[in-house]
């Protein structure tokens, strides 16, 4: 996906940038690990029926809410690191803004919780919610905006890498963007959302690590 050849290191603010990039690198693993543990341990949760966001509902929903917020803060930190390191070439202004929108969207998706439905949490009537609440609508909108922004960021980085003849990195970012922009399938939406989460946070983690390696070189 993202590689060191896609960036140019800044010469100032090195300690601060390293901390920002480290936070950005940790955001993905923290989010994915937390979601995976919850999916395996929350009674009644079935990934083929329930999107990851539904883990934010119920008595233990605070865990996923905190997971969203922490991951979003990590993405905002990554945006700050990108702004310090990507100082020239195409995308130098767009990349940090787009990654920042992704982070803000993740925080909003955590703060505004989706509605219980399809029998989860336990005791919820089976089937979709009859009418979405305002916070459920806000959650869905925030998630859509955040993943779209990250897909555009991946396109920008793909172009940047292609111009630098970093072919594997360009292909990786291009594939990530394609996956994130695929229309949602009504029959497999929860699975697709999970896949999008894996792709999105893998991309941000690889970007953060590549920038860290660039600084260490």
Image (cartoon, rainbow, N blue to C red):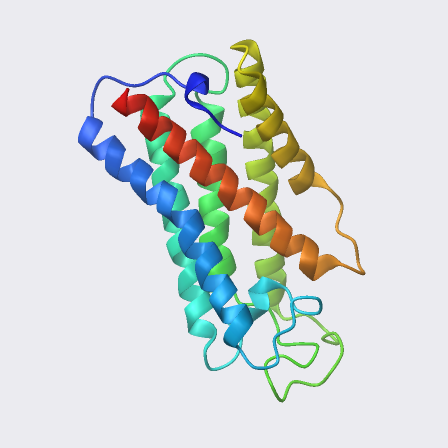
Residue 202 to residue 51: above or below: above
Displayed quadrant of residue 151:
top right
Instruction: Report the front residue among 17 and 134.
Output: 17
Residue 198 to residue 62: above or below: above
Determine the residue positioned at 38% across, 21% down.
Answer: 86
Instruction: Report the front residue among 1 and 96.
Output: 1
- Where residue 106 sits: x, y (%)? 48, 52
- Where residue 193 sits: x, y (%)? 64, 54
Determine the residue positioned at 65% across, 85% down.
Answer: 124
- Where residue 44 sits: x, y (%)? 61, 81
Residue 8 to residue 18: above or below: above
Total tally of numbered discs in the picture: 0
Q: Quadrant of the C terminus?
A: top left
Q: Is residue 84 left or right of residue 123?
A: left
- Where residue 49 sits: x, y (%)? 71, 69
Q: Is residue 8 left or right of residue 143?
A: left
Determine the residue positioned at 44% across, 22% down.
Answer: 93
Q: Is residue 180 left or right of residue 1?
A: right
Residue 101 to residue 184: above or below: above
Displayed quadrant of residue 175:
top right
Q: Residue furthest bottom?
A: 123
Instruction: Report the front residue among 129 and 78.
Output: 78
Q: Is residue 78 left or right of residue 51?
A: left
Determine the residue positioned at 45% across, 32% down.
Answer: 97
């Amino acid at each position: 996906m993202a590689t060191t050849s896609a960036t140019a290191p800044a010469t100032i603010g090195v300690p601060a940038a390293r901390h920002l990039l480290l936070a950005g690198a940790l955001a993905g693993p923290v989010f994915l690990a937390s979601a995976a543990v919850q999916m395996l341990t929350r009674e009644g949760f079935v990934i083929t029926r329930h999107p990851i966001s539904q883990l934010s509902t119920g008595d233990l929903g605070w865990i996923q809410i905190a997971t969203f917020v922490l991951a979003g803060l990590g993405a905002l930190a990554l945006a700050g690191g990108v702004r310090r390191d990507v100082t020239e070439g195409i995308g130098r202004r767009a990349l940090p803004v787009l990654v920042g929108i992704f982070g803000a969207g993740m925080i909003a998706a955590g703060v505004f919780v989706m509605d219980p439905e399809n029998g989860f949490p336990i005791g919820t009537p089976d089937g979709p919610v009859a009418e979405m609440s305002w916070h459920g609508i806000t959650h869905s909108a925030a998630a859509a905006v955040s993943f779209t922004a990250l897909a555009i960021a991946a396109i920008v980085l793909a172009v940047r890498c292609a111009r630098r003849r970093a072919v594997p990195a360009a292909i990786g970012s291009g594939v990530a963007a394609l996956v994130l922009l695929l229309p949602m399938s009504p029959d497999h939406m929860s699975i697709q959302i999970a896949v999008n989460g894996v792709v999105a946070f893998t991309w941000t983690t690889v970007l953060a690590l590549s920038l860290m390696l660039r600084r260490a070189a």
